[in-house]
Image: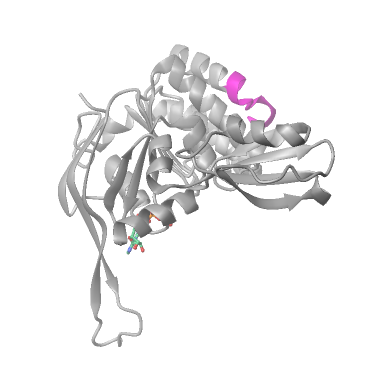
């Protein structure tokens, strides 16, 4: 049985046209999801990406039964999420980066107690589970703090723990790292990777952050106007759109190593000590660019920057519209 099975899914919203008169309201139908089909096997980790308004959040809401499809079928953990919403709630966890499932005025620990009661988890199941989540997510320092007083990073750790308290087989995350600083995002990703490795949890996450996809996902699904535009791995997507990676080198001295075959010098920064070279995986490798630079300059430090999601999407959409 697939963790997710979606066939020819359609979801329309009826919206009022702006400026229409109060008496003769004109209505417009927006097709947020337009014939989407996808399958996700148990244990997979899928990055669900697309531009603003592409239909990601609507799809996640359809997968959880919050929204009813206009047409097509959805099976989440083998269940129809609309007719089996309660049963499904015991088998999936959901994190919406911008919406909370915690009780705002209560200490965080009380939310876990309430969730344990909702899921009917015996104390000898949820207490050790919470202790484990606490240890790995570092909740201890703010367990007694009312949720409304938590920082965004603390709250997100709380949200993720809440979504996983009942050890769901599938975790759906909508923008889990939105607004988090680099360290908090990295910590959350590390935790999710460990959770998946230990429990075989299936992950589906929507994100605008390439770091989430790189660190967490072995598959990428791109949605464009509610339709699948790409399904495969990240290197394949980057190759397909011809997006370029960037090798950043910090030099011992601000010298010009001269032209580098297969790469373009994008910028010289930090008074000549830092140089940025863009290259395409089709043409050369980071190691080859580095070797060429090293021939005439001493490299002190280096990093490779992946293309960002916005750039990849722009290229993919441009290619499919041409
Ligand atoms: N409740 C709603 N009523 C009317 N239209 C909606 C509603 N929710 C979403 N839409 C429209 O449906 C389309 C898809 O929106 P959705 O929020 O699913 O996209 P998204 O890919 O999640 O975007 P984002 O990255 O901005 O969160 C958009 O055109 C949006 O304006």
Q: Nearer the viewer, residue 87 or 118?
A: 87
Q: How many marks?
A: 0
Q: Specify whether residue 18 is painted magenta.
A: no
Q: Left of 184 or right of it: where is 271? A: right
Q: Tell me where residue 255 appears, x and y as whole percent.
A: 81, 44
Q: Which of 6 and 274 is in front in this view?
A: 274
Q: Which residue is drawn at 30% across and 56% down?
A: 320
Image quarter for residue 136? top right
Residue 278 visible, this orientation: yes
Q: Which residue is drawn at 66% across and 25% down?
A: 140
Q: Tell me where residue 122 appears, x and y as whole percent.
A: 41, 16
Q: Specify whether residue 137 is painted magenta.
A: yes
Instruction: Identify whether 224 is placed above or below 28.
Output: above
Q: Residue at x 44, y 26 (%)?
A: 116
Give the magenta-colored segment's residue range: 134-145
Q: Left of 203 or right of it: where is 252? A: right
Q: Tell me where residue 78 appears, x and y as whole percent.
A: 20, 29
Q: Tell me where residue 95 appears, x and y as whole percent.
A: 45, 39
Split into quadrants, the picture shows ligand 1 in the one at bottom left
Which color scheme does this rendered protein use?
Answer: one colour
Q: Which of 297 and 218 is in front in this view?
A: 297
- Quadrant (top left/top right/bottom left/bottom right) for the N terminus: top left
Q: Left of 32 or right of it: where is 135? A: right
Q: Which residue is drawn at 24% across and 80% down?
A: 26
- Quadrant (top left/top right/bottom left/bottom right) for the C terminus: bottom left
Residue 145 visible, this orientation: no
Which residue ends up furthest to the top in the rendered image? 124
Image quarter for residue 288? top right
């Amino acid at each position: 049985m697939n963790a997710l099975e979606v066939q020819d899914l359609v979801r329309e919203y009826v919206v009022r046209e702006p400026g229409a008169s109060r008496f003769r309201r004109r209505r417009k139908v927006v097709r947020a999801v337009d014939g989407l089909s996808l399958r996700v096997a148990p244990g997979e980790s899928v990055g669900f990406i697309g531009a603003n308004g592409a239909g990601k959040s609507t799809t996640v809401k359809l997968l959880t039964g919050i929204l009813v499809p206009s047409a097509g079928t959805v099976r989440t953990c083998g269940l129809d999420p609309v007719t089996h919403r309660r049963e499904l709630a015991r088998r999936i966890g959901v994190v919406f980066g911008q919406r909370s499932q915690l009780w705002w005025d209560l200490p965080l620990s009380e939310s876990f107690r309430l969730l344990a009661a909702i899921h009917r988890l015996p104390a000898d199941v949820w207490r050790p589970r919470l202790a484990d989540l606490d240890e790995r997510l570092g909740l201890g320092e703010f367990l007694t703090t009312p949720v409304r007083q938590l920082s965004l990073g603390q709250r997100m750790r709380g949200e993720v723990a809440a979504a996983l308290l009942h050890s769901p087989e599938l975790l759906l995350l909508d923008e889990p790292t939105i607004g988090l600083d680099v360290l908090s995002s990295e910590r959350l990703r590390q935790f999710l990777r460990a959770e998946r490795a230990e429990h075989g949890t299936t992950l589906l996450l929507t994100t605008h952050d390439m770091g989430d996809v790189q660190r967490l996902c072995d598959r990428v699904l791109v949605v464009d106007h509610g339709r699948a535009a790409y399904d495969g791995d990240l290197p394949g997507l980057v190759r397909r759109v011809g997006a370029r990676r960037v090798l950043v080198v910090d030099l011992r001295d601000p010298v010009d190593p001269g032209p580098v075959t297969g790469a373009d010098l994008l910028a010289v920064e930090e008074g000549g000590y830092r140089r940025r070279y863009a290259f395409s995986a089709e043409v050369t490798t980071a190691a080859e660019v580095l070797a060429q630079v090293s021939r005439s300059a001493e490299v002190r430090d280096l990093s490779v920057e992946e293309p960002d999601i916005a750039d990849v999407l722009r290229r993919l959409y441009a290619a499919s519209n041409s």
